[in-house]
Image: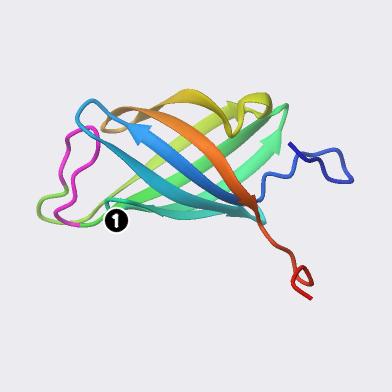
Amino acid sequence: MAFSEFNEPNVEGFYRASFAGHVDFGEALLVLVDDLVAGADSGGVSYDGFYRLGNGSIDLMLTLTVPQGTSLVQGVTARDRQLSFKVDMTVPLKEWASGVTHRVETAYGPVNVIIKKLRNFPRRGAFQ
């Protein structure tokens, strides 16, 4: 993992999150930049929130928005209207994007997640 001039790891970038519940599995693309998280998964669920670095870990505070008619990997379906719920996740930096499986507790049951960094987020001037 690359570190910045302030000895903080460079976590900004594009990530693949592979996840499984007790009924199904899926994948999401997440973008982390400027303390923000945004993404979407293969089922149409949107991920919005923040991340924070500190004490040797990364904390993600997310709101997931599930479109009407979409089923979660835990088996819950947003039947009559969209669902929104919060998910918080703390991962030690040494395990961040390393292929380690993390169990995440949600309002609808646990999910196992593996996060893999796809690439760094480009900065202004990177393509000149």
Up-down: is 128 above or below 74? Answer: below
Question: What residue do we see at 47% from left, 24% from top?
Answer: 101
Q: Is residue 97 left or right of residue 71?
A: right
Question: What residue do we see at 16% from left, 49% from top?
Answer: 78
Q: Is residue 22 left or right of residue 95?
A: left
Residue 83: image location, x then y, percent: 24, 50
Q: Secondary structure at mark 1?
A: loop
Residue type at the position of mark 1: Gly
Question: What residue do we see at 77% from left, 68% from top?
Answer: 126
**Can you say which quadrant of the picture contains the C terminus?**
bottom right
Q: Is residue 25 left or right of residue 103?
A: left
Q: How is the image coloured?
A: rainbow
View extreme (right): residue? 5
Q: Main secondary structure of the magenta part?
A: loop
Circle 1 is placed at which residue position? 44
Few, some or many residues within 10 Å of mark 1 (<14, 14–19, 20+): some
Q: Which residues are magenta?
A: 68-77
**Can you say which quadrant of the picture contains the N terminus?**
top right
Residue 4: image location, x then y, percent: 83, 45
Up-down: is 29 above or below 1? Answer: below
Q: Nearer the viewer, residue 20 or 88?
A: 20
Residue 42: image location, x then y, percent: 31, 51
Quadrant of residue 23 in the image? top left
> What is the total number of numbered labels drawn onto the structure image?
1
Residue 20: image location, x then y, percent: 32, 31
Quadrant of residue 57 in the image? top right
